[in-house]
């Protein structure tokens, strides 16, 4: 019997809109409440080093106010580890971070400064926080994630989604196959498997057919859709697409 995929909603870009003008509106925590009311299984927020969207106070409010698990995206820096251990989210997803990038551009390079990442994982897990690593769907990265004792891997779907947007059918086919192989390999290794970056209704539906995925984390697309149809309708359509791909509903 197929099981539904959890939907984590990333609210970063509600904060982006707030910060473009300054002040308090729109409130990303209000967006989180609306997403949960519409069926989100969890809320994701990325506290960046430069605080370009989510702020420290947002993370604390999310932890204290929302009724679903909080996934704290962060770089594996001493500052962020300290903040996470103070906030105590349900999970932390360690991601690569560069100030000059518009958004996260790829998975963590786990072969670079492995000891530093290992220490961050250990400190977070000692605080009772589940740890996810945002990585490429490559066996070597997955094996390293397992060796580092991560609980979860979130496979980077951005290259696949971009190939589809650009109409590069060959690249899209190759990337989709890589994601499916990676999900199966990670699941066999005993890791929980998530996916995120660039997913929309069509790509979420397609990827949902791979039963090893248990959670999708989706932000930019849903916030953009919410501008036109509202948060509740955007999440309803995403939930339907995921359930359709999983085989839980009929067309």
Image: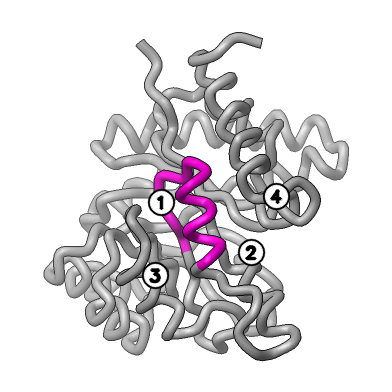
Say whether disc 1 or disc 3 marks the residue closer to the N-terminus. Answer: 1
Q: Which mark is residue 42?
A: 1
User: For the magenta stretch, what is the residue range?
Assistant: 30-44
Residue 183, relative to residue 106: is it above or below? Answer: above
Q: Are marks 2 and 3 in contact (CB under 8 Å)?
A: no
Whether the residues at callouts 1 and 3 have beta carbons within 8 Å, the answer is: no
Q: Is residue 206 left or right of residue 172?
A: left
Please give the name of the residue rendered at 38% of the width and 58% of the height, measured from the top-left corner. 133
The furthest residue to the left = 126
If you read the primary sequence from the N terminus, does the residue marked by circle 1 or circle 4 appear first? 1
Q: Is residue 52 above or below residue 226?
A: below
Foreground mark, 1 or 4, reads 4
Tell me the residue at 64%/50% (across/down). 231
Q: Are marks 4 and 2 in contact (CB under 8 Å)?
A: no
Percent x, y of residue 44 = 46, 60
Q: Which residue is mark 3?
A: 62
Viewer-nearest residue: 90 or 149: 90
Q: Earlier in the sequence, mark 2 or mark 3?
A: 3
> Residue 179 location in percent, x, y?
54, 36
Q: Quadrant of the C terminus?
A: top right
Element at label 1: strand
Asked if residue 15 can be seen in this view, the reply is yes
Q: Can residue 137 be seen in this snapshot?
A: no
């Amino acid at each position: 019997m197929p099981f539904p995929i959890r939907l984590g909603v990333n609210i970063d870009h509600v904060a982006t809109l707030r910060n473009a003008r300054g002040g308090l509106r729109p409130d990303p925590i209000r967006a989180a409440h609306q997403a949960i009311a519409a069926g989100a299984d969890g809320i994701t927020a990325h506290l960046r080093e430069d605080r370009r969207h989510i702020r420290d106070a947002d993370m604390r409010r999310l932890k204290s106010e929302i009724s679903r698990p909080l996934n704290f995206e962060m770089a594996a820096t001493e500052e962020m580890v300290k903040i996470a251990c103070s906030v105590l989210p349900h999970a932390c997803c360690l991601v690569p971070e560069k100030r000059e990038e518009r958004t996260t551009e790829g998975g963590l390079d786990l072969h670079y400064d492995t000891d530093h990442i290992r220490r961050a994982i250990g400190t977070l897990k000692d605080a009772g926080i589940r740890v996810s690593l945002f990585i490429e769907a490559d066996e070597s990265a997955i094996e390293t994630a397992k060796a580092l004792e991560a609980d979860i891997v979130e496979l980077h779907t951005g290259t696949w989604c971009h190939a589809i947007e650009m109409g590069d059918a060959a690249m899209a086919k190759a990337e989709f196959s890589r994601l499916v192989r990676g999900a199966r390999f990670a699941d066999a290794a005993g890791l929980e498997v998530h996916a995120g970056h660039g997913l929309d209704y069509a790509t979420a539906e397609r990827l949902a057919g791979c039963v090893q995925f248990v959670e999708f984390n989706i932000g930019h697309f849903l916030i953009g859709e919410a501008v036109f149809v509202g948060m509740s309708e955007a999440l309803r359509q995403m939930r339907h697409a995921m359930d359709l791909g999983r085989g839980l509903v009929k067309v």
